[in-house]
Image: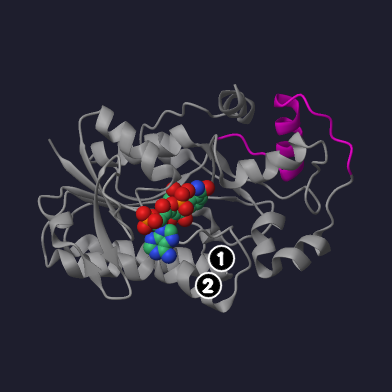
Amino acid sequence: METILITGGSGTIGMQLSDQLTAIGYSVRHLSRSVKGNEKYLTFKWDLTSNYVDPAALEHVDHIIHLAGENVGDGRWTTARKKRILSSRVDTANLILKSLKGKRLKSFISASGISYYGSKTTPSIYKESDELGHDFLAEVSVSWENAAARFKSVTDRVVALRTGVVLSKEGGALSKMATPIKWGIGSPLGSGNQYIPWLHLDDICGMYCKAVQDENVSGVYNAVASEHVTNKGFTKQIAAVLSKRLWAPKVPAFLLRLLFGEMSIIILEGSRIDNQKIKDAGYVFKFDQLTDALKDIYS
Ligand SMILES: NC(=O)c1ccc[n+]([C@@H]2O[C@H](COP(=O)([O-])OP(=O)(O)OC[C@H]3O[C@@H](n4cnc5c(N)ncnc54)[C@H](OP(=O)(O)O)[C@@H]3O)[C@@H](O)[C@H]2O)c1
C-alpha cells in the first residue's frame, strides 16, 4: 500500500480527497499546524516559524500532495496577510523539501491557482502555455509552482493543478455567493461580465487522484470544468437551482473595492480558462456543466 502525505489535509479539498484516496487503497496522513489527537487521519505537526516538521511524517512516504495555504478570500489583503498567503504556500514547500534530506518520492503534487494568468476580464481563453499575469496572486502562483518544481531533485514527477473556484456544499466561494440569493437579495457583482472558472469538489479530488495514479501525468494542468460562465450567469443559475427570484440591482464595483480593497479584484475580474490538457490526459469530469454541479450540491 502506498502512503500519501497531504499538507493542509484538514481543509475542504484535503478531507474529501483523503476519503477518495483511502477508498482506492492508499494510506493517507496529514501534516497540520495543530494536532489534537482525535483527527480522522493520522496527523503530524509542522511549524513554519520554527522550521519544524515531525520527522515521522516523512517516513515511508511515496507521494506528497501540497494543499496548505492561508485562505485567499477571507479578508482584506493587508501586508501581513499577503506575506502569510505567500509564505504558507512557498516557504512550507521549501521546508518539506529541506526536511526530506534527499529522500525520493514517487510524485510531488501541488495546488496552484488559475490566478497564475492574472485576475482580468479579457476575451482570451487561457491555456497552460500562456503568459503569467502581473498582479499579486499571479506572483503567488508562480512562486508556488517554482517551489513545487524544486522537488524535481527528489522525484521524477511534479504536478501542479491550477485550480478554479471549487464548488462544495459547505463554505468557500459558493456559499458566499448563494447566501444573499437565499435571503432574496442576491445580484451580480460589478459588471457581472467577469468569468468565474469553476469545478465541483468531486472533480478537483478526482484530478488529484488521477495525478497520483497516472505516471503519465506530469507538469502543469488547468483544473476547471468546461462550461464558461460569467458572474451574471452564475448568479442566475444559483437562483434557478434554489428557486429564488433575482430582483436587486447589480452590486456596484466601487462598493466592493471599498469593502474588500485590493482583494476585490478576484471578485470583479475573471477570464475563461481552457481545460483541454487535463481532458487529453484522460480525466473524465463528473460535473462539466454548472447546473448539474449546483443540483448535486443543493439536492
Ligand atoms: N477551494 C478553492 O476554491 C481553491 C481554488 C484555487 C486553489 N485552491 C488551493 O487549494 C488548496 C486547498 O484548498 P482548500 O479549499 O482545501 O483550502 P482550505 O479549506 O482553506 O484548507 C487549507 C489548509 O491549509 C492549512 N493552512 C491554512 N493557513 C495556513 C498557514 N498560514 N500556514 C500553513 N498552513 C495553512 C490549513 O490546515 P491546518 O490548519 O491543518 O494546518 C487548512 O486546512 C489551497 O492551497 C488553495 O489555495 C483552492
The answer to which of 42 and 263 lies nearer the viewer is 42
Disc 1 on helix, strand or loop?
loop
- The quadrant in which the C terminus is found is top right
Q: In the image, which disc is placed on residue 271?
A: none
The answer to which of 167 and 175 lies nearer the viewer is 175
Residue with the mark numbered 1: 133
Residue range corresponding to the magenta coloring: 226-248
Residue with the mark numbered 2: 82
* Quarter of the rendering containing residue 263: bottom right
Q: Earlier in the sequence, mark 2 or mark 1?
A: 2
Does residue 26 appear to the left or right of 208 in the view shown?
left
Q: Identify whether 260 is placed above or below 161.
A: below
Give the residue drawn at x 44%, y 32%.
Answer: 202
User: Quarter for ligand 1?
Assistant: bottom left
* Quarter of the rendering containing residue 239: top right
Question: CA gap, disc 2 to disc 1?
Answer: 17 Å
Give the residue drawn at x 39%, y 37%.
Answer: 16
Q: Is residue 235 magenta?
A: yes
Give the residue drawn at x 80%, y 59%.
Answer: 253
Disc 2 on helix, strand or loop?
helix
Mark 2: C-beta under 8 Å from nearest atom of ligand 1: no
Does residue 171 appear to the left or right of 146 in the view shown?
right
Q: Residues within 10 Å of mark 1 (few under 14, many from 20)?
A: some
- The quadrant in which the N terminus is found is top left
Residue 39 position within the rendered picture, expressed as x and y whole percent measured from the top left:
30, 44
Q: Identify whether 281 is placed above or below 80.
A: above
